[in-house]
Amino acid sequence: MSAAPIRVEGLNHAYGKGRLRKQILFDISTEIPQGEIVIVTGPSGSGKTTLLTLVGALRAAQEGSVEVLGEQLRGARPAALERVRKRIGFIFQQHNLLGALSAAENVELGLRVTGAHRPAERRRRAAEMLEAVGLGDRGGHRPEQLSGGQRQRVAIARALVGRPAMLLADEPTASLDRASGREVVDRMQRLAREEGTTILLVTHDHRILDIADRIVHLEDGRLSTFTDSVIANHKRTMDLVARSSRAEDLETRVRDLDEAGFSQLLEELTAEAKRFVDAMALGNDRAFSGLLRQALFAFTHKLSQLLDADRASLFLVREGMLELVVAKDLDTLGEVRFPVGTGIAGTVAATGDIVRIDDAYADDRFNPEVDRRTGYRTRSLLCLPIENREGHIFAVAQLLNRRDGQPFSREDEQRFAGFIASLGVIMESLEVLDAGRRPIQGGTQ
Ligand SMILES: Nc1ncnc2c1ncn2[C@@H]1O[C@H](COP(=O)(O)OP(=O)(O)O)[C@@H](O)[C@H]1O
Ligand SMILES: [Mg+2]
């Protein structure tokens, strides 16, 4: 397809008339290419839902240009709006399933609007779609018999069963816990990629930002220049971070940097993070915290590569406990927490001393619990404390198993320490951004 499925130019929107008129969107311009996943973030009341309903032809645009799937929606007649709507799949915060119908029947409803298929074919496609969202065995269940996450997956199946050109989602994970939210967006992402479906997803859930090809930020009705200005001012580093909105991409990009290049990149990002946390009231900027978070995952991974270790992990010290925040198997591990003073990382947090061990199982400070949970076998280990700018130990970094089977050397220790200082600042920035709201979680490693 040549033209972008969504093209917005100079869009203004206001609710109410006369003295009650209140402008909500100001001069919005953006273009979303075929097959892209774009996330719109922004605080509550910033106009995200309004933007989504305009792009979704749920209301007519008043001023500017909104071209969706080749149709101009400004001043469009109801029939034209409906024509566009039929080619879009919608997912809302609440699943909006019909309680009297089974999951399969709800999904079928998504096909009825198109009127294109016979009942038997509708049933077949609905079953196939339920299978695709991992609910092949739940077709006969009514919504009340399903969990929140499962209901939202039924809503995805319903939205996608008619193979819409485009999917619009408004806070689809807002009522879900972390694990179900993750599953919902992962399914959405996978299906969209397979079908080349364009997705516009509105959310203020920073835990799901990583599925986006691009993140745009709405603030007081204006598409924020936040990332743009960051990029303009600090081209190299932030370009890399901001445009690689998925952790795997970022990983690919840092993979080929040599040690000096990586070092420089880390330094730049560190300076950036410092400057932002110091200078700006970023307390609730989820988009930036999402970017930093992804950087942390990708950079930690890169570190294990540079130091030829099998894996690297980071722990945060919080209220006398260590929390694992970056590790390869984090998603399957579940939450890993243990008290300061126990295990190697806990010892390092308590004493501030670097620990280097050749054979973990021969050391009685080593706690094999995580190994047991992952089926991993730790041999050599290098563990360092990370201090915040006030000189308190607030995190611990750890390298496991040198790939050549040798123990870690003094030289490894010094190189690791050099990088860790930078990672520490990024972690500290995240701590400030999250302001203790929730632990740093997510990512792909
Ligand atoms: N139908 C409406 N009539 C009048 N004002 C509205 C309507 N819908 C939303 N608003 C107002 O527009 C602003 C943006 O709302 P909304 O687009 O829902 O933001 P968000 O989805 O980012 O929370 C809010 O101040 C809200 O009160
Ligand atoms: Mg909203």
Image: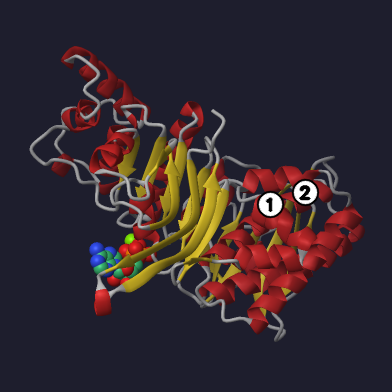
The residue positioned farthest toward the left in the image shown:
100
Q: Is residue 199 left or right of residue 362?
A: left
Q: Is residue 280 above or below residue 321?
A: below
Q: Quadrant for residue 239, please give it.
A: bottom right
Query: Percent position (x, y) of residue 415?
Result: 87, 61
Residue 254: which numbered mark, if any?
A: 2
Q: Quadrant of the N terminus?
A: top right
Q: Is residue 368 left or right of residue 220?
A: right
Query: Percent position (x, y) of residue 237?
Result: 76, 60
Q: Quadrant for residue 133, please give it.
A: top left
Residue at left 26%, top 38%? 82
Residue 298: which numbered mark, if any?
A: 1
Q: Earlier in the sequence, mark 1 or mark 2?
A: 2
For the residues labelled 1 and 2, the Cα–Cα distance comes to 8 Å
Crowd tier of the residue under label 1, counting other residues whose Cα lies within 10 Å: few below 14, some 14–19, many 20 or above: many
The amino acid at mark 2 is Val
Q: Is residue 344 above or below residue 327?
A: below
Query: Percent position (x, y) of residue 391?
Result: 72, 84
Query: Percent position (x, y) of residue 295?
Result: 67, 57
Helix, strand or loop at label 1? It is helix
Residue at left 62%, top 81%? 280
Residue 116: which numbered mark, if any?
A: none
